[in-house]
Amino acid sequence: MPIAQQSAARAAELIAQSDGLVIAAGAGIGADSGLPDFRGNEGFWKAYPALGRARMEFTSIASPRTFHDDPALAWGFYGHRLALYRSTLPHEGFQLLRAWGDGMDHGSFVFTSNVDGQFQKAGFDSRAIYECHGSIHHLQCLEQCGSAIWPADAFEPDVDAEACRLRNEPPRCPACDGLARPNILMFGDWGWIERRSEMQAARLEAWLDQVRRPLVIELGAGTAIPSVRHFGHRVLQRGGRMVRINPREHAVGSADDVGIAGGALDGLRSIAAAMEKKF
């Protein structure tokens, strides 16, 4: 049997043996849904040519400072992303993960560094998702007049994509009428209100305490921003097992775990095929 098929078959066995599925997702899981890849300036500037012409890096635009200095530019970038995420349909891999988790005694819980809300859109229980960097679908006051976090549902961004600038009025804080910003942890960000994410984290820990044989399926999480990887390793230290799907960085630390080289959707499909053969 080819190595790739062996890995998929071993992953299928781990799914069958586990009583709780931990879905640990980085930015790579969205590539198969058509979401842009911000890895390196080249990919980022391809998605946002106006920022490329200005030689403005992701770490600069994704900063509270830009909301203070140039709100139309900051909300041009985040408003475009908000509209994009609202219109994007999650790929079929999300449904495979849902089905596998639904078949386990304790179901599934999502840990993701993504702010796009794709797991909620795919039908995952919002109470079983931990967004460690926050969510673009929620807002907070830029000036931190309080600790309120509210949905961004009422904001419909009108963005000049060529210039990456917001044309309509940006969202305002309902308490002080100051500028609102996404409830996302940005670069150089000392003003992010963590309350929503902290509540998600507490629910995840309570869930993990019940699970005896957790399986982490890690998708599209690299080492450049290692939040997802660090979390997965914590689950391993609690006696869990790992299936890592990644095009370039798929190595795992134990022969009991599985590394699959490839994109998220292809990797999940290979496991689904192995499950059909085996079970």
Image (tube, grey):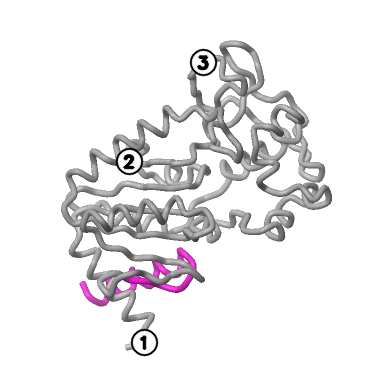
Residue in the image at 42% along x and 69% along y: 267
In the displayed structure, 145 sits above or below 89; it is above
Camera-side mark, 1 or 3: 3
Residue 203 at what x, y percent from top left?
29, 36
According to the picture, the residue beneath numbered tag 1 turns out to be 2
Q: Is residue 266 magenta?
A: yes
Q: Which residue occupies the foreground of this view, 177 or 233? A: 233
According to the picture, the residue beneath numbered tag 2 turns out to be 128
Query: Looking at the picture, which amino acid does disc 1 mark?
Result: Pro
Identify the magenta region: 258-279
SS type, badge 1 = loop
- Most extreme residue toward the top, as rendered? 176
SS type, badge 3 = loop
Residue 159 at what x, y percent from top left?
74, 37
According to the picture, the residue beneath numbered tag 3 turns out to be 146
- Quadrant position of the C terminus in the picture: bottom left
Characterize the local packing of mark 2: few (<14), some (14-19) or many (20 or more) Cα atoms within 10 angstroms.
some
